[in-house]
Image (cartoon, rainbow, N blue to C red):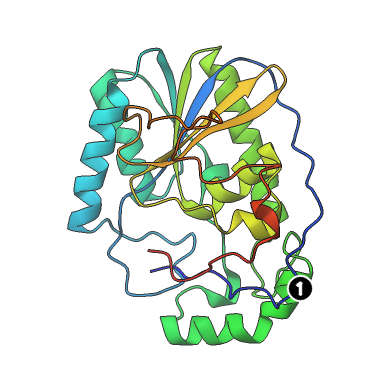
Amino acid sequence: MQLDPPAPPEGAVAEPPREPLPSSGTGSTLWLVRHGHVDAPHASYGDTDVPLSAQGEEETRAAVESLAALDGLRTIWSSPLVRARAMGEGLARATGLELRIEDGLREVHRGRWQGLDADEYRARWDADADAYWEDPLSWRGHGGESEADLIARGLSCLEGAARAAAGQVAVITAHRQIIRAVVAAAVGIPPVASHRMHIATGSGILLEDAPHGWVLHRTSVKPPAARQAAELESGPPEDVAFGPGGGDEERAPDLGPRS
């Protein structure tokens, strides 16, 4: 189980708006899919390789079956870590498409905190939480990667997959933190608010590289590519919990344990 930082102190979450990043305008749609549940002895495995659990293997099979049925699927990109690569490899076998392995899609490197058990990991976060929330994009208190580092390497993969899809569909199989960081930066969700972005194992986020900018269409869809949820009168599908300009950014996020 991976744990997020504790909630920021009261009054510290009224973040200023975050400008979305410019899109390439390819018209491509991208499914960013988190790997299946893992069998890991540590809370903070970060970018080390850990195996899928039996549950994770089933989630991977379900995701592959769902994604393989997508119309217009043109390219598949994956993290090199085995828990994400298993989904990419399965989808490549099912579709006959080539799998592109990208190191930029690895999970965050947690530096000195990798391998800590849950209690020690939480204690480290409790001690460093204030420093993190003061500058969540640049903080490197564990000696590993910052959020800005994740965005820099992940964004090039996002843009590359959109171009490779050439107006059709790309699938990216990766990890919670890299997906959260890159999608939030692309569509303009502030860093604190982005920690409310729930991405269950084996589920996907649907992003569009539209001419006018990146568009977040769906979040935490399980299995990925499932039929779209009923739409609200205001338009967005029910599984899109929040987005830029939606007003949720100023409420304190729920940052409990994430599996």
Relative to 253, 221 lies left or right: left
Position of the C terminus, as image quadrant, is bottom left
Relative to 258, 26 lies left or right: right
Where is residue 13? Give x, y as percent: 73, 66
Position of the N terminus, as image quadrant, is bottom left
Mark 1 Cα shell of 10 Å, populated few (<14), some (14-19), many (≥20): few
Q: Nearer the viewer, residue 251 or 16?
A: 251
Q: Residue furthest front?
A: 233
Q: Answer with the quarter of the image where residue 133 lies.
A: bottom right
Q: Element type at marker 1?
A: loop
Residue type at mark 1? Gly
Q: Nearer the viewer, residue 69 or 87?
A: 69
For the point 70% across and 45% down, the residue is 152
Q: Is residue 247 above or below residue 210?
A: below
Q: Is residue 141 above or below residue 49?
A: below
For the point 61% across and 29% down, the residue is 215
Relative to 197, 23 lies left or right: right
For the point 59% across and 80% down, the residue is 125
Where is residue 31? Give x, y as percent: 45, 31
Q: Is residue 109 above or below residue 176?
A: below
Q: Nearer the viewer, residue 143 or 158?
A: 158
Relative to 221, 123 lies left or right: right
Q: Answer with the quarter of the image where residue 244 lies.
A: top right
- Residue 165 showing in the rendered view: yes
Where is residue 246? Give x, y as percent: 66, 44
The total of numbered circles placed on residues is: 1
* Residue that mark 1 sits on: 11
Where is residue 214? Give x, y as percent: 65, 29
Q: Nearer the viewer, residue 258 or 45?
A: 258
Q: Answer with the quarter of the image where residue 158 lies.
A: top right
- Residue 117 showing in the rendered view: no
For the point 38% across and 46% down, the residue is 84
